[in-house]
Image (cartoon, helix red, strand yellow):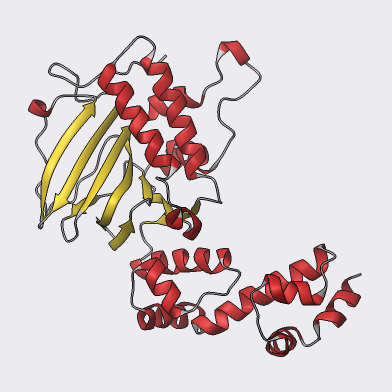
């Protein structure tokens, strides 16, 4: 069992698990506090302009506002409910350009390995189904990738952000903070269980679009990856205005990125994604063509037929007959 230490003076700076909060307002950090790991008196914050790295993995979760993350390869914007999972080789710093409240979780390699290990009570049952986070950690542990610089990006889906209640990830972080503050008997076991549930929440495609970003890719690749996830979530039926609202970038700028990276406009990209979904529904379900048209949000059936025929060379009915 990996030791967890509640915060306070005398705690070791190389604690296996550390949780902290930061509030940014008016171009500066207005509050920074540790919930567990080591005490504030032993911590000297990095200068605002200084890129830094940790000896541990770091999860950054945005509780509210807009967070501007500065990495080696550019500047990236995260909204409330978004998160990123940095490996120890990624140099980064917090930007003070926008107001926000952040939660940081720092987890050392050995702590994570123990977290994923089977427990004697259920030796044949894994506590955590193998997912992107576990794969990310295992691959970054390998000696041949010790200099790999990459991170996981978790962008909240539109449905998550439009929900009226706080995201489950935010609730789980509150529960972890409460356990650290109380330090009651068995709190370390409960925190490990909450962390596994947090990982599962972040990996749920219904809640988050997950992208694995290499540090040698730029901010345009980052934005494109998020845009593609949102377009797929909306089955291609998302225009510039909606994407601009979701991604917090100008619609014309987004269109230029798509054109540069893919050679398509946002409208053309949406049509391709939409037709791919239509082909899937026609091949894998018994839905009528009319139902497919409605499912994809088309009001004008004639327009759908024209788009589908231009993309595939056949009508929806002909496509279905050829596939059966």
Q: Residue at x 66, y 73 (%)?
A: 296
Q: Residue at x 82, y 63 (%)?
A: 285
From the viewer's perspective, is 27 left or right of 77?
A: left
| x and y percentages locating residue 148 in the rendered image | 39, 48
From the viewer's perspective, is 313 left or right of 211?
A: right
Against 272, residue 6 (above or below) is above
| x and y percentages locating residue 204 in the rendered image | 54, 46
From the viewer's perspective, is 276 left or right of 150?
A: right
Residue nearest the viewer, comparing 117 with 59: 59
Q: Give the quarter of the figure containing the C terminus.
A: bottom right
Against 278, residue 19 (above or below) is above
Residue nearest the viewer, comparing 255 with 58: 255
Q: Give the quarter of the figure containing the N terminus.
A: top left
Against 252, residue 95 (above or below) is above
From the viewer's perspective, is 12 left or right of 288?
A: left
Residue nearest the viewer, comparing 169 with 39: 169
Visible in this render: residue 16?
no
| x and y percentages locating residue 177 in the rendered image | 30, 29
């Amino acid at each position: 069992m990996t030791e967890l230490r509640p915060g306070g003076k005398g705690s070791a700076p190389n604690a296996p698990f550390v949780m902290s909060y930061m509030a940014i307002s008016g171009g500066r950090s207005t509050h920074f506090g540790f919930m567990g790991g080591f005490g504030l008196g032993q911590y000297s914050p990095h200068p605002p302009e200084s890129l830094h790295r940790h000896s541990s993995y770091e999860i950054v979760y945005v509780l509210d506002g807009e967070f501007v993350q500065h990495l080696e390869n550019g500047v990236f914007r995260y909204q409330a409910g978004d998160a990123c999972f940095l490996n120890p080789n990624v140099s980064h710093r917090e930007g003070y350009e926008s107001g926000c409240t952040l939660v940081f979780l720092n987890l050392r390699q050995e702590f994570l390995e123990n977290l994923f290990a089977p427990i004697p009570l259920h030796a044949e049952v894994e506590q955590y189904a193998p997912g992107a986070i576990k794969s990310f950690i295992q691959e970054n542990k390998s000696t041949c990738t010790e200099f790999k610089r990459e991170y996981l990006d978790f962008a909240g889906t539109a449905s998550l952000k439009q929900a009226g209640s706080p995201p489950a990830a935010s609730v789980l972080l509150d529960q972890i903070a409460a356990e650290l503050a109380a330090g009651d008997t068995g709190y370390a076991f409960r925190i490990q269980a909450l962390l596994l549930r947090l990982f599962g929440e972040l990996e749920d495609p219904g809640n988050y679009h997950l992208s694995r970003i290499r540090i040698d890719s730029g901010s345009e690749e980052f934005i494109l990856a998020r845009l593609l996830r949102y377009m797929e979530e909306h089955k291609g039926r998302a225009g510039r205005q909606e994407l601009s609202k979701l991604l917090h970038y100008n619609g014309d700028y987004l269109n230029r990125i798509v054109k540069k990276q893919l050679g398509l406009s946002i409208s053309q990209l949406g049509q391709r994604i939409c037709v791919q979904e239509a082909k899937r529904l026609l091949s894998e379900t018994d839905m009528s063509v009319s139902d497919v048209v409605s499912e994809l949000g088309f009001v004008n059936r004639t327009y759908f037929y024209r788009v589908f025929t231009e993309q595939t060379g056949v009508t929806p009915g002909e496509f279905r007959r050829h596939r059966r």
